Amino acid sequence: MTKSLALKVQDDAPAAAPASARIKLSGVPDDRAMLRAAAELTRDLHAPNPRIYWTDMLLSAGIGYAALAATILAPSALLAVLAGAVAVLALYRASLFIHELTHVKHALLPNFRLGWNLLVGIPILVPSFTYEGVHNLHHARTRYGTVEDPEYLPLALMKPWTLPVFLLAAVLMPVAMLIRFAVLAPLSAVFPKLRRVVVAKYSGLKINPAFERREPEGELRTQWFWQELGASIFSIALLALVATGVIPLRDFGIYLAVIAGVAVINQVRTLVAHLWENDGEPLTVTAQYLDSVNVPTPGFFAYLWAPIGLRYHALHHLLPSLPYHALNEAHRRLSDALEEASAYHKANYPTLRGLMHRLAASTMGAR
């Protein structure tokens, strides 16, 4: 597509800000040319390809579990570490399909949610109900970046100790989820007051501690019941096998360490998914986009720390229903069509390291 045929930015587009400068998000008007281009240039990209989804998920899970077994059986510490790294990265990729499950129309991917939960979600203690019904609120026009957003905190405006605590929570996640499913789930089935607390506080993957989840309704209620039951049975059985010595404590520790590794990488990825610079004000779609991050530059490490299309996180906030395998083409079309003055180009950043440095520097300035 040539520039002469491309959609151009109108005068209402927000001014560019240096990549290192904090962006004043409140009051940023919508870039109508960008929003129009995003809708018009991607109409043919919204259908998920079942072959891609199933192949990617099955290969990622298969490699991950094979590497986990190799870690446990490795004859030396070096081989165990190498196999463990492969297990973490592969299972991390497999786990991120939970994000796709919150956006895709399930009728277009028959049985994918069931397959993913049985093969990945339950074994790594994050069944999809913990994200479905939560993540969509993060995309709600009037909730993003506010106290009602379960996935947002103004991290860039918070104290320096916030980031270490944020990462420590990921390290402890596997133990917390085992307690959630092996202990709290069965107890809450008997005690209604406890159940209300478990649903509100301990049934969603969130970073905003003030967020409380509501009771599920409709299809999600049914999905929640069976997924929670499966995760509870798995967790209780796992702990019973460890307690009786069927599964050695060392092997159990490796399993927990691999899941913790998955959680830590995801937490680091979360730290650079947004700029985290909104102080709680409702934002326009363009402002939400500018508070989000694309890392489009091809690079080996970008495919490891931000797989399943997540290196196009800002683009995902423009087009949440776009399947992950279409994001690269959508980015190419929009980059070619929109002028450099467009807000679209202002959410592109070159590296993970630069984003982490920006966030750390911002928190250091919030002493």
Image: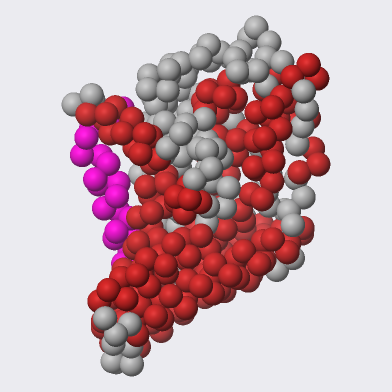
Instruction: Give the tally of numbered discs.
Output: 0
User: Does the magenta run of residues contain 163?
Assistant: yes
Query: Is 332 drawn above or below residue 202 in the view shown?
Result: above
Q: Is residue 229 visible?
A: no
Horizontal side of residue 206 vs 111, given as left or right: left
Query: Is 125 drawn above or below residue 334 in the view shown?
Result: below
Q: Is residue 355 visible?
A: yes
Specify the quadrant of the image occupied by residue 164. Answer: top left
What residue occupies the far left of the structure in this picture? Answer: 367
Query: Is 191 drawn above or below residue 237 in the view shown?
Result: above
Residue 219 position, x and y percent, is: 67, 60
Magenta residues, start to end = 157-176
Q: Quadrant of the C terminus?
A: top left
Q: In percent of the image, x 68 and y 10: which residue is there?
A: 10
Q: In percent of the image, x 60 and y 65: which residue is there?
A: 57
Q: In percent of the image, x 77 and y 32: which residue is there?
A: 41
Q: How is the image coloured?
A: secondary structure
Q: Quadrant of the N terminus?
A: top right
Query: Is 31 drawn above or below residue 331 in the view shown?
Result: above
Horizontal side of residue 259 vs 289, given as left or right: left
Residue 282 position, x and y percent, is: 50, 24
Query: Which of 49 and 5 lies nearest the eye of the viewer?
Result: 5
User: Does the magenta run of residues contain 170?
Assistant: yes
Residue 228 position, x and y percent, is: 51, 69
Q: In percent of the image, x 36 and y 34: which residue is there?
A: 354
Horizontal side of residue 79 vs 344, given as left or right: left
Task: Please identify the dominant SS of the magenta region.
Answer: helix
Residue 351 position, x and y percent, is: 42, 37
